[in-house]
Image: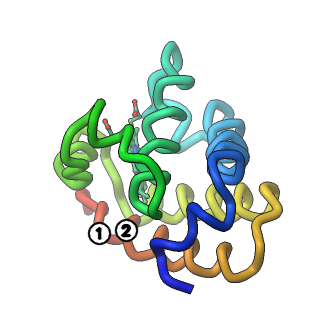
Amino acid sequence: MSEGDLYGLIGEDGFQRLVAAFYRQVPRDEILGAMYPADDLEGAEQRLRDFLIFRFGGPSRYLEQRGHPRLRMRHFPFPITQGARDRWIQLMTAAIAEAGLPPEVAGTLGAFFDGTATFLINRE
Ligand code: HEM
């Protein structure tokens, strides 16, 4: 399966379920909870959802609204240590399971998140 096929397989609905399951865990997380904007979690949810939809072959709403992702730069304000990275992956792994995505989709997304999250580490 190529990354560009992923949107065709799970659609808006699949990404919606995935990202909602991720953000449902964020507020009560002792590492990530404080990093995300408590008064705009809905907006944060929409930004991640639209980014993933764009990245995996769907409509490019993210680009239109936010411009080039430049993820490392956009994450620089947040202290992403190895521990924060591992926690993010832990929550996302739980979200992938909760969203009930097909195994090949879960595998492709998991590998993408793993690599991208490591790339975003920006503090010792
Ligand atoms: C490694 C651990 C990570 C931490 C601690 C983290 C934390 C954050 C925080 C606090 C925000 C701001 C929320 C907001 O949009 O208002 C954010 C935004 C965002 N994150 Fe992450 N993130 C991590 C990994 C990732 C990964 C792996 C991806 C890509 C799959 C990602 C994609 C995004 C996107 C697209 C935004 C919105 C950027 C924008 O348009 O402003 N993040 N992240």
Which residue is under mark 2?
A: 116
Q: Position of residue 118 (x, y in %)?
A: 36, 71
- Which numbered tag is attached to residue 81? none
Total marks in image:
2
Q: Is residue 111 above or below residue 53?
A: below
What amino acid is labelled 1 in the image? Answer: Phe
Q: Residue furthest top?
A: 39
Q: Is mark 2 within 8 Å of ligand 1?
A: yes
Q: Is residue 29 above or below residue 102?
A: above
Q: Which residue lies at the image location 54% right of the left edge and 34% below the top edge?
A: 45
Horizontally, residue 82 falls left or right of residue 99, namely left
Which image quarter holds the C terminus? bottom left
Q: Is residue 81 above or below residue 28?
A: below
What amino acid is labelled 2 in the image? Answer: Thr
Q: Foreground residue, 11 or 16?
A: 11
Q: Is residue 26 above or below residue 106?
A: above
Q: Position of residue 56 (x, y in %)?
A: 46, 63
Provide the secondary structure element on which disc 2 rests.
helix
Residue 1 image-quadrant placement: bottom right
Q: Is mark 1 within 8 Å of ligand 1?
A: yes
Measured Cα–Cα span from mark 2 to mark 1: 5 Å
Q: Specify how the rendered protein is coloured.
A: rainbow
Which residue is under mark 1?
A: 119
Residue 122 image-quadrant placement: bottom left
Q: Position of residue 110 (x, y in %)?
A: 57, 74
Provide the secondary structure element on which disc 1 rests.
helix
Q: Which residue lies at the image location 68% right of the left edge and 40% below the top edge?
A: 20
